[in-house]
């Protein structure tokens, strides 16, 4: 069995890849993909902790898996909304480049 | 054997993730994301989270990748095959590396070396989900409903004003 810390290091590596993507990419679709990578890193962390730890406080030993289910639910809702916003942005401005969506920037 | 699987899956997960943030082609990025997400489902399997692995393949591999590909195809701009990063990418790399050093050091210092893997069965998981977590479950269904209605309204709103 692989110790918990290696799953946590994998999760940290995936998280910073997603973080770099959010900061460096210009296309809104690619930013959404990077956010998905970060959410997956968090899920790996939660599930690794859930399957390695005994219960802690009032939490039983697999509550991390249930929180991960909620994260997946919210991620699905987020992608649906993000797609609607991206389509709207494309219809209004004919671009999905976030550097050009600066109407509210001063 | 467990180490072997872990290393293979970690290589696919991180390789797919790097592909998403490095490639110049948006459709290739979506396919790299699919590789990464399916490898994450494999990581869930070696953590004995079978239900999450199933959900990961169904929701991420099925639904979310398809929605992202729809978003790509419906907003097909001429720059998609050779998209560029913005000018602050070196700063972004430095910031991400800094966060990575902090996170990695925190995990490494507080590392738990003993491992007592436990795997809840489907019935344990569903009992907990529908008793102790019943109210968050209902709130999650409300969130999905609101997101659905909001997505429809945002995507349709232009038609009457035209």
Image: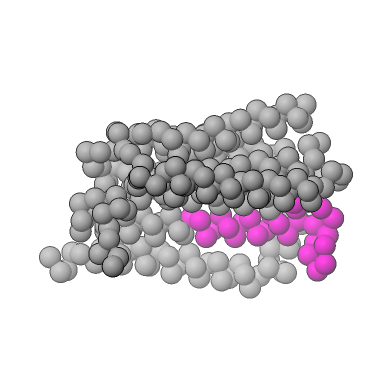
Q: Measured from the top left, where is residue B129 in percent x and y?
A: 69, 63
The front one of B149 and A79 is: A79
Residue B106 pos. (x, y %): 72, 51
Q: Residue at x 29, y 50 (%)?
A: A97
In screen coordinates, is B43 left or right of A91? right
Is-magenta flag for residue A50?
A: yes
Q: Main secondary structure of the magenta part?
A: helix
Q: Indicate the quadrant containing the N terminus of chain A: top left, top right, bottom left or bottom right.
A: top right
Residue found farthest to the left: B162
Q: Residue B98, image x and y in percent?
A: 58, 48
Residue at 75% in and 53% down: A50
Residue visible at 49% across and 68% down?
Answer: B143
B87 over B6 or under it: above or below: below
Q: Quadrant of residue B14?
A: top right
Q: Is residue B66 on the magenta stretch? A: no
Horizontal relation, residue A90 to residue B116: left or right: left
| Front residue (pair B36, A96) | A96
Where residue A93 sits, quadrant-wise, is bottom left
**How is the rendered protein coloured?**
one colour
Q: Magenta part of the protein: which range?
A: A48-76
Q: Vertically, is B88 above or below A75?
A: above
State the residue at coordinates (56%, 52%): A39
């Amino acid at each position: 069995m692989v110790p918990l810390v290696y799953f946590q290091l994998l999760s940290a590596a995936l998280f910073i890849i997603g973080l770099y993507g959010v900061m460096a990419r210009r296309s809104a679709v690619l930013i959404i993909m990077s956010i998905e990578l970060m959410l997956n890193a968090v899920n790996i962390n939660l599930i690794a902790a859930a399957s390695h730890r005994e219960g802690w406080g009032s939490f039983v030993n697999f509550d991390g898996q249930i929180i991960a289910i909620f994260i997946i639910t919210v991620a699905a809702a987020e992608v649906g909304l993000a797609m609607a916003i991206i389509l709207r942005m494309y219809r209004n401005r004919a671009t999905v480049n976030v550097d050009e969506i600066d109407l509210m920037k001063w | 054997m467990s180490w072997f699987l872990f290393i293979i899956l970690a290589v696919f997960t991180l390789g797919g993730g790097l592909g998403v943030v490095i490639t110049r082609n948006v459709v290739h990025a979506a396919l790299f994301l699919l590789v990464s997400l399916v490898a994450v489902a494999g990581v869930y399997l070696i953590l004995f989270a079978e239900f999450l692995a199933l959900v990961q393949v169904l929701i991420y591999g099925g639904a979310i990748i398809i929605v992202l590909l729809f978003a790509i195809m419906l907003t097909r701009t001429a720059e998609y095959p050779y998209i560029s990063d913005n000018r602050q990418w070196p700063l972004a790399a430095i910031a991400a590396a800094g966060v990575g050093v902090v996170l990695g050091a925190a995990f490494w210092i507080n590392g738990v070396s003993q491992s007592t893997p436990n795997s809840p069965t489907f019935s344990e998981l569903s009992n907990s989900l529908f008793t102790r977590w019943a109210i968050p479950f209902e709130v999650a269904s409300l969130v999905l409903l609101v997101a659905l209605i909001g997505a429809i309204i945002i995507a349709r709103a232009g038609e009457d004003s035209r």
